[in-house]
Image (cartoon, helix red, strand yellow):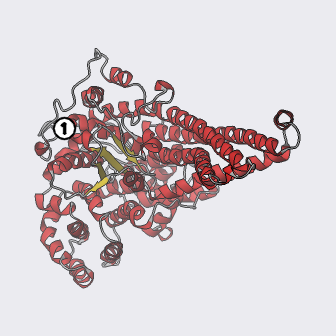
Amino acid sequence: MATQFFENQDRAHRNTTRLVLLFCLAAVAIALSLYAIAAVATGFRGTDPVTQQLVFEIVWLDPLLMLQVGLLTLAVVGGASLYRISQLSGGGRVVAEGLGGRLLHSDSTTPLERKILNVVEEMAIASGTPTPPVYLMDHEVGINAFAAGFSPSDAVIGVTRGCVEQLSRDELQGVVAHEFSHILNGDMRLNIRLMGVLYGILVIGMIGYFLMRSTLWAGAGSRRSSKDNSVMVMAAIGVALMIVGFLGTLVGNLIKATVSRQREFLADASAVQFTRNPEGIAGALKKIGGFEVGSQIESPAAPESSHLFFGQALSSGFNSLFATHPPLAERIKILDPSWQGAMVEAGVGAAPAGHAAAAGFVGGDTPVASTGSAVEQIGRVSEAHLDYAVQLLRELPPTVKEAAHDAFAARAVVYALLIDADAESRKLQLEILDAKGEGGVPELTRKLLPEVERLGTGHRLPLVDLALPALRDLSASQYECFQGLVRDLVRADHRIDLFEWTLQRILLTHLAPTFEGVRRSGRRLRSRQQLRQVVAVILSTLVRAGSLSESAMQQAVDRAARNLVAGELRLLPPKELGLARLDEVLALAASLDPTAKEHLLRACAQVIAADGQVADSEAELFRAIGDSLGCPVPPLLPGQALV
């Protein structure tokens, strides 16, 4: 039975197919409109009377002209879409900066900025995703927010100043939970593709505008001295193209409305599921309704990005037909069935920003309760995980937490996590650190090491998640040095244990998009035999990390793989395995469809738990495999089963 995360991933794939179909229909409509314009233009140049020529051209059609117009439309509209998508290939950062967002550094102590950063950190740790960069839209007074990116690795959260200033922390948490649901459900990739597609549809109108302006300007003098009406004909064609562009705008808005509305209802429901507090997100929506500015966005880039936002970013002259979001009252009524229609004045109930850093959205020492299995929680956040995140952040020593927020010191935190307990290996690692570490980092690593070693194993990966935003602030040269030093520290004792591999894998997965660009792997599974080999490597690696006998391991692997491959699956010997080999097959497994990924992760959980116990290193390994497949795995809670 599919979990909600994988169902949502499948829905996102279907919506992508739907978007391609709508784009093709829009392109055909544009091509027909341009054919009519071309027919009119050729009619004006003909020797027959205009009316007769138009009837001949339009009614009887001209196959050659239609083919020429169709190919030209495909080249212009398709080329413009591909160009815009390539511009957006930098991921969420490009979108946020285009909307005027300012990156908030994770070590910020400004109360207003700390308020939103704390909420995002808690949600990230609870969901098992890397902490996304946060962008503040300083000049936007409306109450709004967005999530953008291709995957959790390059996702960003954007918020308006009005959102942070006007909302209480519970309300802000509801808005952030809504945006995290878009990150987890695969909506962001569709949103960026939608921006690219719409740009291609709108470019015809832009061409018409420039054609009209340039033609009229160039021919302003010649019209008075010549009977040649070609200038006016070209200007008329420009106007006609603008009309087609206007119709394209309407079609584009209709596509955005078609694709976006239902996802907003689902994201609202997910936010309530995450927080168990419908009053939070409902309160935010009521404040939008009671605020003079509402959720309006003034950025020039808002029209192409309006479908990204939490609330309606633009006023819609055609009301519900072209609105990218459901009516505000309808969203509130679903969240709060007893609501009588009264909106709330903005700012009422907003916690003072100065208290944000210490505030939590659950009771102080509320015990962490367990929930469903880890597989069932993939891509989701529960109230128990939110409790856990708040509790974990409070347990981190202030010096370690502060270091994780600083680009310089965050490197020392990672190095400290890699220092071995074995005296001989530690000595060698510290020598490598002294020789290759940048000035001051080796000393800081030694200073943080005692406190990092006292942390429980459950704090290790959340601490890495916490440090990721600061590590993204490194320069290219600093990142290259950091990456090389991590590799050297891992290899110092000539062996790589499960935690070291997990740490390396998570760093590579989530820092590479920032420093190496968002890349789509061309490696895909091509055959059933290749899938069989991938599954065998992954499951054999995991089961050999446990304590079963050879025969029990074979039975566990064979039993777990039944929903993935036909027939018995051979347990691979150690000489055919290794963590480097695991890296190779995970790159292939990332191309699986959502249903196959779910079956694979269930199989992984089964073989890990086959010996009746789940070590911390095995739980971390499961998290790293989920990360590699694009399936965020929340922290394993006390008493929680993997599957």
Instruction: Pinpoint residue 147: horizontal percent, then vertical percent.
Output: 38, 45
Whether residue 186 can be seen here: no
For the view shown, which residue lies furthest in the front direction?
225
| Rendered image quadrant of residue 311 | top left
| Rendered image quadrant of residue 373 | top left
Instruction: Pinpoint residue 633: horizontal percent, then vertical percent.
Output: 36, 48
The residue lying at 75 percent from left, 38 percent from top is 36
Q: Quadrant of the C terminus?
A: top left
Instruction: Pinpoint residue 161: horizontal percent, then vertical percent.
Output: 25, 44
Number of other residues with Cα within 10 Å of mark 1, as a class: few under 14, some 14 to 19, many 20 or more: some
Q: Amino acid at mark 1?
A: Phe
The reply, left or right, for residue 431 in relation to residue 128 is: left
- Label 1 sits on residue: 361
Secondary structure of residue under mark 1 = loop
| Rendered image quadrant of residue 38 | top right
Of residue 429 and residue 136, the one placed in the foreground of this image is: 136
The reply, left or right, for residue 248 in relation to residue 269 is: right
The residue lying at 53 percent from left, 54 percent from top is 84
Of residue 528 and residue 411, the one placed in the foreground of this image is: 411
Whether residue 118 can be seen here: yes
